[in-house]
Amino acid sequence: MSCLMVERCGEISFDSPDQNAKCVRMLGDARVRGQTGVLSERRGSYPFIDFRLLNNSTLSGEIGTKKKVKRLLSFQRYFHASRLLRGIVPQASLYLLDEDYLGQARHMLSKVGMWDFDIFLFDRLTNGNSLVTLLCHLFNVHGLIHHFQLDMVTLHRFLVMVQEDYHSQNPYHNAVHAADVTQAMHCYLREPKLANFLTPSDIMLGLLAAAAHDVDHPGVNQPFLIKTKHHLASLYQNVSVLENHHWRSTIGMLRESRLLAHLPKEVTQDIEQQLGSLILATDINRQNEFLIRLKSHLDNQDLRLEDAQDRHFMLQIALKCADICNPCRLWDLSKQWSERVCEEFYRQGDLEQKFELEISPLCNQQKDTIPSIQIGFMTYIVEPLFERWAQFTGDTPLSENMLNHLRRNKAKWRSLLHKQHSSSRSNDHSGQVTGSQEQTLNEEETP
C-alpha cells in the first residue's frame, strides 16, 4: 500500500491492510500517487452525487442503510471504471454517422478557427462526440501527434475517457461546454501576440487543460459541496474543490491511458504540474487575483513571452477567457449557453430548497432571472477580463469582434430585463384594479 493513498467514499475501511488493499482493487476507488508525488484520482472515482444521502435520516426507509448505499455507489464506480479500463466504450461514443453528416462535420472543422463556430451543430453532426473529434483534429493541425510521437489509438482512448467523464445530464457543465472552451482556446492560441512565442508543449497544455478543465463536474458549485459536507470538500479543505478534482481526475486518466508514458519522466512530471496550474486558474474565486496581476503586467509593459513563466501566465489568462467566453459569442449561441447555465443554477436551488438548505446566490428561480444574472456576470466578470485581453492582443479583429458581441448581447439582455419589469408592473397594476373592483362590487351587494 506504499504507492497508494486511498480515498474511500463513505469511509469504508478494514482493520487489515490486506483487506484494505483488496477493497481498493475491487472498488476502483483509489487515488494513485505517481512519481511526482501528485495525487491523481482513478477513473470513475466518484459517482454522480446521490442527493438522497443529504437527508437520509428522513428517507431511510426508501434507500436502506448508509452502508448499503455506499456499497452500491462503490460498485457503480467500479463498474464504470472497469468497462473503460477493459477498452469497452459505451455505445453512445461510437461513430454511427452517414456520409452526409461526416461531410458536414469535416466542413465545419475546416473553419474551426472562426469565432462563429457553432459547437451545438458540430456536436449533433458528430453524434455527441464533439470533444473527441475536435481534439483529434486540433492535435493533428498543431502537429502535436508528430512532435510528441503520440499513438493515435491511445490518444483517442484518452479523449473518450475525458468525454465520458463529463456528465451529459448537466445542462451546462458537460462535454459540449468542454468542446466549446477548447475551440475558443484554439482561437486564442492563434492570436499573433501569443502564437509567435508558443512551443508545442504550450499548445498541448492549453488544449488539454481546456478539454479537461471541468471533467466530472457534478452540476453543483463549491458552496453546495461545502455545506453538504461532501467528501471532495473535506479532501481539498474547501479550497478550489472542483478545480482540484478536475485536475487530479485528468492526471488519473493520463496515467491510465498511458498517453504520455513514452516521454521522459521529467517531461510528464512537468506536464502534470502545469496542467494543474492551468485548471486551478479557472476557479472564479481567483478572478481578481489574476486580473490585478494582468493589469500590472500590461501597465508596466513587462510581459516577456520569451520567458516560460510569462507564457504560462498568459495561457492561464487565455483559459480563463475561453471558460467564460459565452457572452462574447453570437447572440443565438450566447443565449443558449446563458439559458443552460441558469438552468443548472436553478436545479441546484431546487435541491437546496427541497432539503431545507439556504438557497445559494443566483440559484433562486423566483428571484434571479436570466437577464439579471447575465447582466451582472457580464459587467463584473466578463468585461474587465476581456478588455484586458484585448489590451494584451493589441485590439486584433478577434478581440474587437468578441467585445462587440459582448456589448450587443448585454444590450439585448437589458432590453429583455426591461420588458420583464414592464410586464411585472403591468400585471401588478392589473391585479390592484381587479381587487378594487371586487371590493366595490362586494360593498354594493352588502344589504
Image: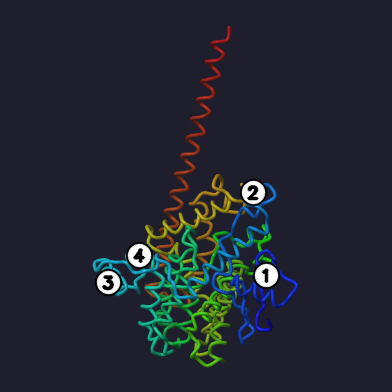
| Residue, far left | 100
| Residue wearing tag 3 | 107
| Residue, far right | 15
Q: Residues within 10 Å of mark 3 (few under 14, many from 20)?
A: few
- Tell me which corner region of the image, top left, top right, bottom left or bottom right, holds residue 96: bottom left
Disc 2 + disc 4, Cβ < 8 Å: no
Amino acid type of disc 1?
Leu
- Disc on the earlier residue, 1 or 4: 4
Front of the two marks 3 and 4: 4
Residue 341: x and y in percent read 49, 57
- Disc on the earlier residue, 2 or 1: 1
Circle 1 SS class? helix
Viewer-proximal residue among 323 and 86: 86
Q: Residue at x 54, y 73 (%)?
A: 43
Amino acid type of disc 2?
Phe
| Residue, far top | 447
| Residue wearing tag 1 | 235
Q: Residue at x 54, y 17 (%)?
A: 440
Residue 369: x and y in percent read 51, 49
| Residue wearing tag 4 | 127
- The relative height of residue 100 versus residue 370 in the rendered view (above or below) is below
Q: Residue at x 34, y 69 (%)?
A: 95
3D distance between C-alphas at marks 2 and 1: 23 Å
Amino acid type of disc 4?
Asn
| Residue wearing tag 2 | 355
- Disc on the earlier residue, 3 or 4: 3
Viewer-proximal residue among 320 and 9: 9
Viewer-proximal residue among 133 and 12: 12
Quadrant assignment for the C terminus: top right
Residue 331: x and y in percent read 38, 58
Quadrant assignment for the N terminus: bottom right
